Image (cartoon, grey):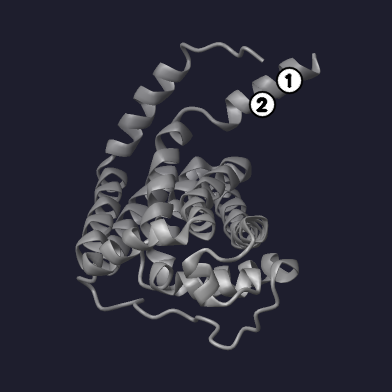
Amino acid sequence: MILLDIGTWAQGAVSGGLLLALPVALLAGLVSFFSPCVVPLLPGYLSYATGLSATDVMEGRGPRLRLLAGSALFVFGFALVFVLQGVAAGSIGRALLQHQRALTIVLGILAILLGLIFAGLVPLGQRDLRFHRVPKVGVAAAPLLGLLFGLGWTPCIGPTLAVVLSLAMTEGSAVRGGVLAFVYALGLGIPFVLAGLAFARMNKVVRFVRRHQRLLMRIGGGLMVAVGVLLLSGGWEVLMAEVRQWATGFDVVI
């Protein structure tokens, strides 16, 4: 009975519109990783989280377990920030369910504006609040540093995060909002951990991103605008209805 209840809860928590929003959130996290306030400063962030020098991180000379632990705990710290924001957004959306269509229109307009900002076509929100004098305290304080940097990144990655939180609001559920924000954090965090374990290999990707950063941000902004257009036009609800119909064809197997 307990296993069945867990399966039923899981099916309810990850179903319908959320199945459509999850890949959007994951892609938004990846786009955020390649933003100007994250990828160019990757060696510094990893140095803060592990207590190793930036040179050791870039050349892969540090202990792999230390690099893994430091980067993973750092990711855990900023993931907690985003999940709490997702839970809050989902709770607000639940309170506004009776105004669902009006809320979706407002969020659609907001997503379009944020996409244009992220693409650099609207000169707003281009600054971040990085902490420039953080001691290299190492693995033990990596979660706290993740919390601090998660808050400090918010103005810079705000457009992508805000689109994910907008989708969390349309879900109208604190649990689904938290799940959506967690997947966003995975999109941002998994490349971070991979960079910690193999920065020399990731460095090729970093150099590529630096050379084509404007193009990549334009593409990311365009995808955000597309989500906004779907929300504004009602296309998102149509797609959610299709996904819900598809999802109902599966039974709980837990």
Tell me residue 4's x, y (percent): 72, 15
Residue for badge 2: 9
Q: Amino acid at mark 2?
A: Trp
Residue for badge 1: 5
Relative placement, left or right, of 153 versus 174 is left
Tag 2–tag 1 contact (CB < 8 Å):
yes
Q: Nearer the viewer, residue 23 or 46?
A: 46
Could you tell me which quadrant the C terminus lies in?
Answer: top right
- Image point 51% across, 45% down: which residue? 183
Tell me residue 20's x, y (percent): 40, 34
Is label 1 in a helix, a strand or a loop?
Answer: helix
Q: CA distance from mark 2 to mark 1?
A: 6 Å
Could you tell me which quadrant the N terminus lies in?
Answer: top right
Toward the right, the furthest residue is 2
Q: Nearer the viewer, residue 55 or 228?
A: 55
Tell me residue 21's x, y (percent): 42, 40
Q: Nearer the viewer, residue 209 or 7?
A: 209
Toward the front, the furthest residue is 61
